Amino acid sequence: MEKTKDLFKKCIDFTLADEVKAQGVYPFFHPIDETEGPVVSFGGKRMVMAGSNNYLGLTAEPKVKQASIDAIKKYGTSCSGSRYMTGTVKLHNELEEKLADFFEKERCLLFSTGYQTGQGIIPTLVQRGEYIVADRDNHASLVAASIMAQGAGAIQVRYNHNNMADLERVLQSIPEAAARLIVSDGVFSVSGEIVDLSGLVALAKKYNARILIDDAHAVGVIGRGGRGTPSEFDLVDDVDMIMGTFSKTFGSLGGYVVGDRSVINYIKHNAASLIFSASPTPASVAAVLASLEIIKDQPELTEKLIANTDYVRQGLLKAGFTLMPSRTAIVTVLIADQMKTLIFWKKLFDAGVYVNAFIRPGVMPGHEALRTSFMATHEKEHLDKVIMEFETIGRELGVI
Ligand SMILES: Cc1ncc(COP(=O)(O)O)c(C=O)c1O
């Protein structure tokens, strides 16, 4: 009889992380001692944070911190239950109303993370025999949500990244009677590139598809008053559902979707990731409420963010780096070699600049990159340091 295979053999055989650690260039899970936003400290050493999604710097904003503290005093540290049951406090409903209003949609629904938001929307709406039409570069959470939907009989078809001719080819291949949802990031998370929303909306109309845009990296960055991608293109009414996260511009934790009343009501009463998971903590929700007021009252923060990012982008281009196409708060430097990416990351880290290393499985071989992202609260001296260290190390490693 054949011997039963050990489930854990794959774990014992997984040596990549240990090998990278042994070479002293492991770029993940480094604990920050303290953070002010644009500057953080590691083991007592101060560093420029150039890899956070805290785009408007709101995690360090006193009003946002105070709102969380006040909410803890009033409601405690957790709701200890799902929104569906005993886990709704007034703050949840207040935030849903204010976000629906901000994003100019009828209704909003909160989730406990952005990741769970996709898991709540896609498998709930796209059912057996119905189609998910997805950009190949969509965020991993949307990919996971589609896999879940496929497990229940939905069909996924993918089109080449932001390629409207390929999207049309894919839409034409779907049986005419089948319901379909086009899913795309608004601002792509690795590159910072913006979706061709005009093209996507035109095709959705032509082929009777509904649209879901994940605007995690767009809010506070693009669009009227930081309202994101549909607003940037003046197409809010043409995008059926807009989802996002609170873990970036909103300086908190959680996710949301906005859309028509009937759609949000259906998701609210059927989404497993909402019904079977505890609601966002009062502290998280209160932080978002405070952040939302700041986003509305201080549009100059978005202007500063874009100016900061443009400044770094121009500096790195002038130094000779190859950047991925972006005009958002993400500047991704292509290195195209795994080991060189890790060494570059470590040298930046040692020089006091903290960025993100993207290697497999995050990106395909040949697309290894250093992803930087900026905040409205970065000062010129921080940005100059980032450019200067990139240039010095880039020359040393022969990248430029
Ligand atoms: C495009 C996109 N969608 C969803 C998420 C998940 O959001 P959260 O961190 O709230 O789970 C992220 C976070 O990285 C993201 O970039």
Image (spheres, grey):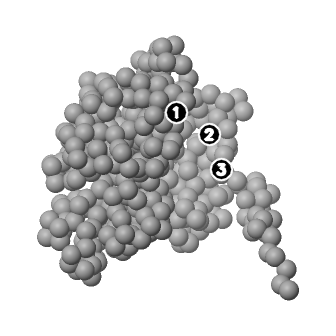
Residue 357 vertical position relative to residue 295 in the rendered view, above or below: below
Q: Give the amino acid at mark 1.
A: Gly
Question: Which one is in front, 38 or 271?
Answer: 271
Q: Give the amino acid at mark 3.
A: Phe
Question: Would residue 177 be found to the left or right of residue 75 on screen?
Answer: left
Percent of width and height locating residue 343: 66, 57
Q: Which residue is mark 3?
A: 28
Marks 2, 1: nearer the viewer: 1
Q: Which residue is mark 2?
A: 352
Of marks 3 and 1, which one's residue comes earlier in the chain? Answer: 3
Question: Are circles 2 and 1 on residues that touch, CB within 8 Å?
Answer: no
Distance from Cα at disc 3 to Cα at disc 1? 32 Å
Percent of width and height locating residue 223: 23, 43
Q: Give the amino acid at mark 2.
A: Gly
Distance from Cα at disc 2 to Cα at disc 1? 42 Å
Marks 3, 2: nearer the viewer: 3
Checking the image for residue 81, the label placed there is 1
Marks 3, 1: nearer the viewer: 1
Dividing the picture into quarters, in which one does residue 194 lie? bottom left
Question: Which one is in front, 297 or 49?
Answer: 297
Q: Residue at x 35, y 44 (%)?
A: 268
Dividing the picture into quarters, in which one does residue 19 lie? bottom right
Q: Residue at x 31, y 33 (%)?
A: 96
